[in-house]
Amino acid sequence: MSSGRFITLEGGEGAGKTTQVRLLVDRLAARGIAAIATREPGGAPGAEDIRHLLVSGDTARWQPMTEALLHTAARVEHVENLVRPTLATGTWVISDRYVDSTRAYQGSAQGVGAEAVLALHDLALGGLMPDLTLVLDLPVELGLARARSRAGGEDRYERMGAAFHIHLRDAFQAMAKAEPQRCVLVDAAGDVDVVAARLWSILASRFTL
Ligand code: T5A
């Protein structure tokens, strides 16, 4: 049996990742391709416990390196308990965020360093990377306004200030530019259906659907 495809959606706050992950899974299913939706931090019981430590509370509650380690620890639980076993059955995995978020948030915006984050990723997970990463790009104010419109108190990163979010957007854009074989920068402005059509046409150009 061939391995499933591993696809990640990345981008700043409120870019529409969660919405689009669900739509992609539904559309793949309609084509007869089994796929699951998952997210980071989270996606496995231990990882969801760690998520709670990261997405709530005071913005300064952790040292940046501690955050990088916590996100990496959550990722180990997620990948070893869910992602790798699922891919091995031939089912596709569509994840709302992955290591590129740690590179952008902790590595770049919080100053840990992108190389340090990748070194941790190599050590913890043998450097497992997605087959395709869709980087949803949106002006910061629009993304934050969308994020504030959804319910829930998991807003620790949203509260980190405009300069932080502008830095993040630059970091995601730079990553997409530097790794064009794996990453595609996608305009996330416009209606949900319009963005979904953009993503689907990228998948169709990369994989047999
Ligand atoms: N983090 C994560 C790190 O710092 N390091 C890491 O390594 C990792 C993995 C996770 C936080 O953790 C940080 C980044 C995050 O801050 P989260 O709650 O999962 O926390 O945060 P986000 O991933 O940013 O989730 P959001 O819900 O804020 O954004 P999404 O998923 O991009 O957007 P979505 O789909 O939930 O949409 C937000 C709202 O906009 C609407 C939706 O209905 C929803 O109300 N919407 C649209 N409205 C208009 N037009 C469209 N096209 C729309 N698409 C969605």
Image (cartoon, rainbow, N blue to C red):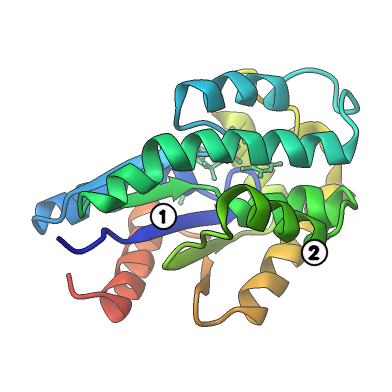
Measuring from the top left, give residue 21's x and y in whole percent.
38, 47
Placement of the C terminus among the 4 image quadrants:
bottom left
- Residue placed at 58% from the left, 60% from the top? 127
Q: Residues within 10 Å of mark 2 (few under 14, many from 20)?
A: few
- Residue placed at 30% from the left, 80% from the top? 205
Measuring from the top left, give residue 56's x and y in whole percent.
72, 20
Decide: is 89 above or below 41: below
Looking at the image, residue 168 sits to the left or right of residue 145; the answer is right
For mark 1, give the secondary structure: loop
Mark 1 beta carbon near ligand 1 (under 8 Å): yes
Q: How far apart are the alpha carbons under marks 2 and 1?
A: 36 Å
Looking at the image, residue 11 sits to the left or right of residue 205; the answer is right
Decide: is 174 above or below 122: below
Please tell me the numbered disc located at residue 191: 1
Measuring from the top left, give residue 45's x and y in whole percent.
47, 21
Looking at the image, residue 107 sits to the left or right of residue 174; the answer is right
Placement of the N terminus among the 4 image quadrants:
bottom left
Q: Quadrant of ligand 1?
A: top right
Q: Which residue is nearer to you in this view: 142 or 125? A: 125
Q: Which residue is nearer to you in this view: 47 or 60? A: 47
Measuring from the top left, give residue 10's x and y in whole percent.
56, 55
- Disc 1 residue type (three-letter): Asp
The residue at which mark 2 appears reads as 115
- Residue placed at 34% from the left, 50% from the top? 93
- Disc 2 residue type (three-letter): Glu
Decide: is 103 above or below 150: below
